Image (cartoon, grey):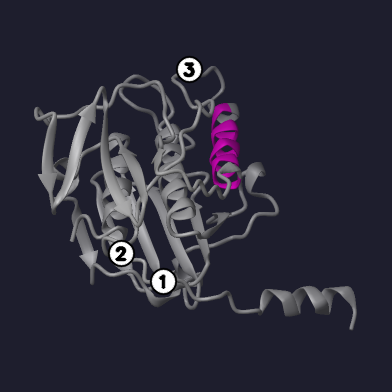
Amino acid sequence: MDEDQKQQGQKKEETPSQDNLVTDTDKITFAEEKEDYGINDKKSINVTIVSVIAVVVIIAIIASIPYIYNPEPKISTGLVKINSPHPSAEKAKEYIYNNIEFKREGDFWYADLKTGNTIYSAEFYYGPREIENIQIAGENVFGTAFQNEKLYVTFDPNESKYSRSENNESTMKFVALAVGQIDTHFIKTFKKQIIAACTNEEAPACFGRPIINCENATDTAVILVKEAAKPKITFAGNCTIVEGKEWDLIKAAENMVMRAYAIIG
């Protein structure tokens, strides 16, 4: 058997099954505190260069969040952050949602959840009340492939290439932020092996990366992050599509994460 045959054989191996993604009180959410990943607001002279850098950042975020287990009685966590104020209409500083207490500290929301003797503190940009009404399409359930360890997170590297905000800034940073939020929670809490992918190979940063879209989600779990005019989550079998524009994309991403935790039903 030559080397190519061995590699093909390895790709066909099944990944081990995991606990159900929709959790009860025994499954805890948490995210790892991260420094700025270089996705701060910066004026761009060359849109193409900025887009290439942004694509590299997204790939780097997916690849850089490690597995960490901390047996301390309480684990304080953070989230991927950008230095850009996010709009919020919520006036309350704390409230109970689905028997879980959410508290606002500064610009972020925290929820302490307990499993055994360990308490995890989850951090979000938005509380559940602000994001609970995101439009849902499909059966509102993750496909069976989400029980497996491997999870592809993919995006279109050209989608935001010329997309600009009202301030003439690249919107690719919001795709990077949404990807970072999803990856952090799914790696840390559900122990997923996240694989960075692209929907096409047109961007240099995607050369050599897996080319994955919903058509590949036959027996593989896929989360597709994309820009769209309105926030929406689509459950399409083993492919979950998270879409929106700028901060609405972050709302959709956090809504999907909270559904994985069974915080939002």
Q: Is residue 52 magenta?
A: yes
Q: What's the residue at 46%, 42% (across, down)?
A: 180
Of labels 1 and 3, earlier in sequence is: 1
For badge 2, the amino acid type reads Thr
Q: Are marks 3 and 2 in contact (CB under 8 Å)?
A: no
Q: Residue 106, how many percent across, how many down?
A: 26, 22
Mark 2 and mark 1 residues within 8 Å of each other at the beta carbon: yes
Task: Check disc 1 and give the amino acid type.
Answer: Asp
* Residue bearing mark 1: 19
Q: Residue at x 23, y 46 (%)?
A: 230
Give the Cα separation between the discs numbered 3 and 2: 39 Å
The secondary element bearing badge 1 is classed as loop
Give me the disc on residue 64: none
Q: CA distance from mark 2 to mark 1?
A: 8 Å
Q: Nearer the viewer, mark 1 or mark 3?
A: 1
* Label 1 packing within 10 angstroms: few (<14), some (14-19), many (20+): few
Observer-nearest residue: 223 or 102? 102
Secondary structure found at label 2: loop
**Is residue 244 a member of the stretch shown in magenta?**
no
Q: Which residues are magenta?
A: 50-63
Q: Is residue 42 above or below residue 34?
A: above
Residue 95 on image: x %, y %: 11, 39
According to the picture, the residue beneath numbered tag 2 turns out to be 23
Q: CA distance from mark 1 to mark 3?
A: 42 Å
Q: Which residue is mark 3?
A: 42
Q: Quadrant of the C terminus?
A: bottom left
Element type at mark 3: loop
Q: Residue furthest right?
A: 2
The percent position of residue 169, horizontal first and vertical second, equals 41, 23
Front residue of 113/51: it is 113
Q: Residue at x 18, y 29 (%)?
A: 88
